[in-house]
Image: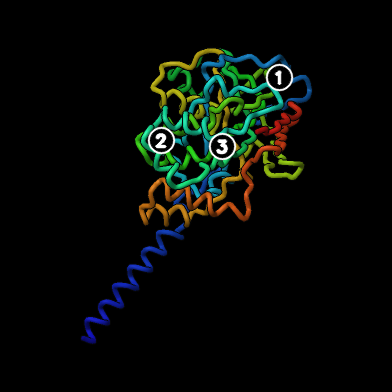
Amino acid sequence: MHKIIKYSLSTTIVTVVGIASYIFWPMAYTPTPANSECLNVNNNAGKFVPLQFDKSNIYGIAMSYPGIIYQPGSEYHPEIMPPVFRKRQQAINTDNIVKYPNQKMILDQLDVIEPNISKALQEEFETIPVLMDYEVELGIIVLDEVNQKQLADPDYSPKLGYFLANDLQSLTFGILGSGTKLESEYFNAKGSFPGFLPVSKQMWIPRSEQANSTLCIDLRTTVNGKLRQQANTKNRIYSNKEILGFILKTYNKEKITKGTAIITGSPAGVANNVSRWKRRLGKLLRMSRVDKLSSSFNAIKTDNKFLQPGDIVETEAVPFGSIRTEVIR
């Protein structure tokens, strides 16, 4: 009996240590900024023109700054592409107002992606949470067609314009889609509600670029006057050429057409703030999507930084100025 107890105790200890090691073990790789050459917006190095782009071709990438990888407990591997998504035309917003998604808008969008999930959510929640987040981002406009062969040339310099954007999104759709066969559809939908992409009215075009050039500017976000995000775009971990390559590979394209717009990711400071150990524990326990959403919704009730009707979000970057967005019911 003594041997059985001793064996059981040893097995339990090994199991607990193994689980703890998995949950709290740091990432194997550390994300570092890309080796980019900073473009200077001063000294007559470029020009401002009205923002024009192909509104049917808007893409984005996520997890492109070290801070945004660490903040929500995401994982990173240098050989794995970051999440890539599309924005729908209805998301483009050149006004100062964005409408907070109501329950009908949420349910209608869920029915488009996965009709069966609506019933489960309505049984769990009296009101399905929106979890509306904000992300200040530097955007790029493709000024000439780009293909894979060009990107493979180390000396090739894509011709790009730059603009400012605020990538609004519903984290609810991110949670529901994560790890499922419909992940791409959910990811595309979470930021494509009407008005969810406020953009600057101008773009800046450099007079010349190097193969690894990018515009290095300070990005800031305030919500109701309180600073939430602040970082420089030189800290982004992917170059412009890498980002273009991600778009081509993800969507199996031969080329990116002139006028395509891409938002290049956001720094830390967003409302979504789930530690890595909680994410890993949820995965280990095989929590359902509804349970994960419920857990996230309950966790933020005491410190809710997600946007609500009446909130005013201001994203800014010199030399673009600011984009002021008011969330209305």
**Residue 208 drawn at (x, y percent):** 66, 18
Q: Crowding near pointer 2: few (<14 within 10 Å), some, many (20+)? A: some
Is 17 on the left-hand or right-hand side of 269?
left
- Mark linked to residue 34: 3
- Secondary structure state at the residue bearing disc 1: strand
Task: Judge depth for marks 2 and 1 and give the one in front.
Answer: 2
Q: Residue at x 57, y 17 (%)?
A: 142
Q: Residue at x 67, y 41 (%)?
A: 231
Earlier in the chain: of badge 3 and badge 1, it is 3
Residue bearing the label numbered 1: 202
Earlier in the chain: of badge 2 and badge 3, it is 3
- Secondary structure state at the residue bearing disc 3: loop
Q: Residue at x 67, y 42 (%)?
A: 229
Residue type at mark 2 is Glu
Depth check: give the residue in front, 27 or 137: 137
Looking at the image, do the residues carrying marks 3 and 1 touch, with CB atoms under 8 Å apart?
A: no
Q: CA distance from mark 3 to mark 1?
A: 26 Å
Looking at the image, do the residues carrying marks 2 and 3 touch, with CB atoms under 8 Å apart?
A: no
- Secondary structure state at the residue bearing disc 2: helix
Residue bearing the label numbered 2: 183
107 is higher (above) or lower (below) than 142 = below
Residue type at mark 3 is Ala
Is 325 on the left-hand or right-hand side of 292?
right
